[in-house]
């Protein structure tokens, strides 16, 4: 039991907030005290549900003296402006991945927090998932030897979920590379340890009606000849959760009867406005807060090849495939799927060991996303510059 | 029922022959009439089991007037010499993958068959597996739209099976790229259609006791922005057949109680000679001919992403993940897992539609293997020259 929860404000009461809310409510590392959101319905729902203050602007939230830290869950392209305002108000920051869209914005966010002397954590991302962190600890204990290769794959219907227009424009931060590759990159960086050196990648943009990257494959070279291979399809019909005990990304068991639901729902809309409205219908205030998921979150099958074992991560724990035998290490139960993020924020704010996923970390992961896009465009490998 | 089986000779009675033998015996497209092998025990076993002639040299086999075609299943580095001798004797050829180790040797083999006016099929390879060929036919029918991305993964203990010394030396054609990548490349080429343009790859050689590549990941760019992603570990503890109904590469259900058997067996040998002897113990004459496998062969999970469906290949057939529903298309039962290879040889020899997997095809797949090695060494993409 934490006796001094961080008094948390939230900027943005959209989909990102909804996905983290069950964990926030179940956790004692943070206490929700205020929010900023442009839509009055969202603000009213916030006050009705949690009490506290709900502001129309981020500036007002930044001026609230009772708020210690703010979770920035606004659209990617607004992170910089909101981070600068909030850091200027002395608030510690938890910024949704990707930290920003442009590297300049990411650098500006890091600089703003350094200037203000506040902490910055980039998250939530799936690198905070309990099986990922548990695997990292097992690897650090040394009994499996060195991590040599990591393979991460994920097949989802990401591109057919309801989107705002900018989410379908790469220049505006849309497509699967900024929103999804950043998870795989984060997970791989945590598990591999060490520094990424180069990226070679190919991307696919196959659906003219949704003109952004919906799929990619990437090779990331790490120090010592180690490498990671990522593959992702957001156009997918195949659902790689079939290899994850039919547990979805958010830690809940999937209803297999809903096969094809995203494409079916999308077929009912006839304009970008209708599609955006469909997305708004999934935000805070429009639907009930879901219960805490029973399993850890995950981002698709991940296989970590070490000298003396392969580790396969599932939503329930870690399959250890050793030289002579197999075993399964169940992930210790956390109060909620996003507990590690909230604990990480608490540790950072209270001066304990902060999580790996700092602002610089978030910027390095963003650089990898850009490298995927750049390599796919140029056809050659991209050498990374901002990893250390 | 084929009334005119091709009278088949075999060069090499080792492991490759053993793996194809059950299909040869079950098939009426070919009839085994002669063999060449350096070991007298193998020759004696051949005659005792099948009758026919068994020669100590490939030259004698080439001179046997009753032999129409020869299956060259000798070690990779001998393919060229044996192919030149046998083509010179007017024999049609079925040459095990990889067609050769060097591109020069592959070209010499193709040239020798052209000069002699004999047919050349490169195989067996997993591109002849029934689910692969069935998927290709479904794709050609057009209802799934264009193939956009293919992902192939395979985690095996390849590097820990008993090996002759040259199989652990890349210069001599050892390692997983020549022996295993060639399968993935063949399968992907059949499924994708069209022409491969470039390769970017990384390889791993992690075990100093087995100093060759044991793992790789590769991106292959095809025409029209389409691409394939391959990942392979021959160091694996994880067994990707767990995602293939626990059916092994050769179409038999795995005995999960034998987990770790390859590494355990290898731990009992103390010299390269003992290891080579362990391998010889698995060749023809040393062990019984296994029964015909009940399922198709396969080379690990393969996901083919098309515009309107993803196809997942298993040893039992094809999972079709469509826009609105899933279905399963069982692969039609063939007389044996390698029936398509033998039928292909028969068609080529008898002047019917020959299989895709010609000599030029085998050379193109070999070029892709070299490109994987070259890209891993140089760090950049390799442009292919011999694909058409």
Image: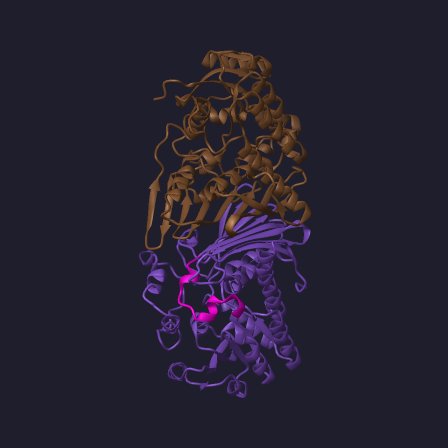
Chain colours: A brown, B purple
Using the rendered image of the protein, determine whether residue B97 is visible from the camera's viewpoint. Answer: no
Front residue of B200 and A156: B200
User: Residue A97: x and y, percent?
Assistant: 55, 31
Residue A319 horizontal side relative to residue A156, left or right: left
Residue B170 belongs to the span the image colors magenta: yes
Residue B255 horizontal side relative to residue A387, left or right: left
The answer to whether A1 is drawn above or below residue B251 in the figure is above
User: Residue B353: x and y, percent?
Assistant: 62, 70
User: Residue B37: x and y, percent?
Assistant: 45, 81
- The image quadrant that residue A40 belongs to is top right
Using the rendered image of the protein, determine whether residue B152 is visible from the camera's viewpoint. Answer: yes
Q: Quadrant of the N terminus of chain A?
A: top left
User: Residue A365: x and y, percent?
Assistant: 56, 37
The answer to whether B143 is drawn above or below residue A241 in the figure is below
Front residue of B153 and B384: B384
Front residue of B113 and A127: A127
Number of marks drawn: 0
Residue under the image location 34 percent in, 68 percent down:
B270
The answer to whether A301 is drawn above or below residue A165 in the figure is below
The answer to whether B283 is drawn above or below residue B66 in the figure is above
Residue B348 belongs to the span the image colors magenta: no
Q: Quadrant of the C terminus of chain A?
A: top right
Q: Which residues are magenta?
A: B156-172
């Amino acid at each position: 039991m934490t006796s001094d929860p961080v008094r948390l404000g939230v900027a943005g009461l959209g989909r990102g907030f909804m996905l983290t809310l069950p964990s926030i409510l179940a956790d004692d590392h943070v206490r929700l005290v205020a929010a900023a959101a442009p839509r009055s319905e969202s603000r009213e729902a916030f006050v009705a549900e949690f009490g506290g203050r709900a502001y129309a602007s981020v500036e007002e939230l930044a001026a609230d003296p009772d708020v210690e830290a703010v979770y920035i869950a606004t659209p990617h392209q607004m992170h910089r402006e909101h981070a600068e305002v909030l850091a200027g108000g002395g608030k510690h920051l938890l910024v949704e991945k990707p930290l920003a869209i442009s590297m300049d914005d990411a650098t500006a966010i890091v600089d703003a927090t350094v200037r203000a002397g506040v902490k910055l954590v980039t998250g939530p991302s799936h690198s905070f998932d309990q099986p990922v962190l548990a695997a990292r600890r097992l690897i650090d204990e040394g009994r499996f030897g060195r991590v040599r290769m990591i393979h991460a794959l994920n097949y989802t219907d990401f591109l057919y979920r309801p989107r705002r227009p900018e989410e379908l424009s790469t220049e505006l931060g849309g497509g699967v590379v900024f929103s999804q590759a950043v998870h795989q990159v984060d997970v791989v960086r945590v598990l591999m340890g060490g520094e990424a050196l180069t990226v070679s990648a190919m991307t696919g943009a196959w659906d003219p009606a949704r003109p952004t990257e919906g799929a990619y494959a990437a090779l990331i070279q790490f120090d010592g000849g180690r490498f990671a291979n990522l593959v992702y399809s957001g156009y997918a019909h195949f659902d790689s959760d079939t290899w994850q005990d039919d547990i979805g990304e958010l830690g809940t068991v999937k209803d297999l009867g809903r096969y094809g639901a995203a494409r079916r729902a999308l077929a009912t809309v006839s304009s970008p406005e209708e599609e955006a409205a469909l997305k708004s219908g999934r935000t805070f205030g429009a639907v009930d807060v879901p219960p805490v998921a029973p399993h850890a979150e995950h981002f698709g099958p991940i296989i970590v090849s070490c000298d003396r074992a392969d580790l396969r991560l599932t939503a329930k724990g870690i399959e250890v495939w050793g030289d002579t035998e197999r075993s399964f290490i169940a992930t210790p139960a956390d109060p909620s799927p996003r507990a590690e993020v909230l604990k990480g924020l608490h540790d950072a704010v209270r001066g304990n060991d902060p999580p790996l996923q700092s602002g610089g970390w978030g910027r390095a992961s963003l650089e990898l996303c850009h490298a995927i896009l750049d390599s796919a465009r140029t056809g050659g490998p991209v050498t990374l510059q901002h990893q250390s």
